[in-house]
Image (spheres, rainbow, N blue to C red):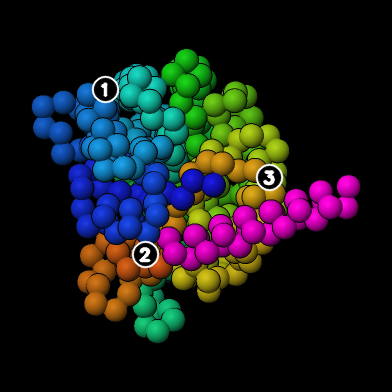
Amino acid sequence: MQLAEVFPSQPSRLWHLAKQLGVDHAVGGLPWEEKLEKPWDLMPLIRMKQRFADFGLALTVIESMPPSNEIKLGTSGRDAEIEVFQQFITNMGAAGIPVLCYNFMAQFNWFRTSTTTRTRGGALVSSYDHSLMKDAPLTEAGTVSEEQLWENLQYFMERIVPVAEQAKVKLALHPDDPPITPIRGISRILTSAAALQRAINLVPSEYNGITLCQGTLATAGEHIPSVIRQFAKQDKMFFVHFRDVKGTPEKFEETFHDDGQTNMLEAMHAYYEVGFSGPARPDHVPTMEGEDNANPGYELLGRLYGIGYIRGLMEAAEAARAAKGTVASVSV
């Protein structure tokens, strides 16, 4: 497993601290600070990759995308957005950036009803309570059905997967968060492991796979080690968000990595059992004492805790696998 962290596109304190903790792989967004070129153009991507490389970080994943809401809604501008998306993937391939984490959540991305829920020791986490949305008005997009979204996803994949194959860029589809439908009239279709499987089966390709977001799928009630094995045996697990929750799709909250409903050591053993060698990063961490919660889920101290916790699990899984191999060789 490649221990990674998501970084801003310019050097920051997090770059230094993550390297000091042994992180060698970077997940980046689009370099929106570029003023003379579009952030999905080739040279901004190359310069961003080189900034990371000069710092000792390998840019392995881009977890961002050009404007795509018309693609998801299937409105009149979707073909223009798809053309930009195709150029973006082509440029990622030319820059040598191997994985794109993208989503198909229309109108709004990951969604919470609170970013100030108290957890262990008074730390702040995000949470979701679907009952608070029962009287929420529709968005300007109106009602968007699941059938529409499935049709729009297939239309998009049919035009984007061949480009990814040519560019040798792996498309890692992220599940919908929260995994519940609809929200404000906007359906969510990628709400389970079965839905992710259906999605990547729309256009079968070795470059069409998933981001295994443990938190979202745990919220959906999935057994995470089983999901790991399901997608790993198909070689469709390209990227991992290593996090946890407490609750159900109707009402849940984020947690510290060691305080949720998933057996995280069992999950890590599953990654090592299947030989997963891709990038994994901590995600949606608590805001801790002394932090202002200006960036809920992504403040600094919780990230450092998450990195350390994941490194410990990795060492435990590596040691267990090595011991198992030793026993097997002795018995032979």
Residue that badge 3 annotates: 274
Q: Tell me which residue sits at (26%, 43%) in the image.
A: 55
Q: Give the residue at mark 1.
A: 42
Provide the major secondary structure of the magenta segment.
helix
Along the horizontal axis of the image, is 327 left or right of 139? right
Name the residue at 57% across, 59% down: 315
Type of the residue with mark 3: Val
Kind of element beneath mark 1: helix
* 166 vs 59, nearest the viewer: 59
Magenta region = 307-332
Q: Position of residue 173 (x, y in %)?
A: 50, 38
Indicate the position of residue 27 as horizontal and vertical percent values.
37, 44
Instruction: Report crowding for label 1: few under 14, some 14 to 19, many 20 or more residues within 10 A (C-alpha).
Output: some
**Picture layout, residue 90 above or below residue 229:** above
Alpha carbon separation for disc pair 2 and 1 = 32 Å
Instruction: Identify the residue at horizontal 41%, vertical 37% (top origin).
Output: 60
Q: In the image, which disc is placed on residue 304?
A: 2
Q: From the viewer's side, name the closer residue of 11 and 285.
A: 11
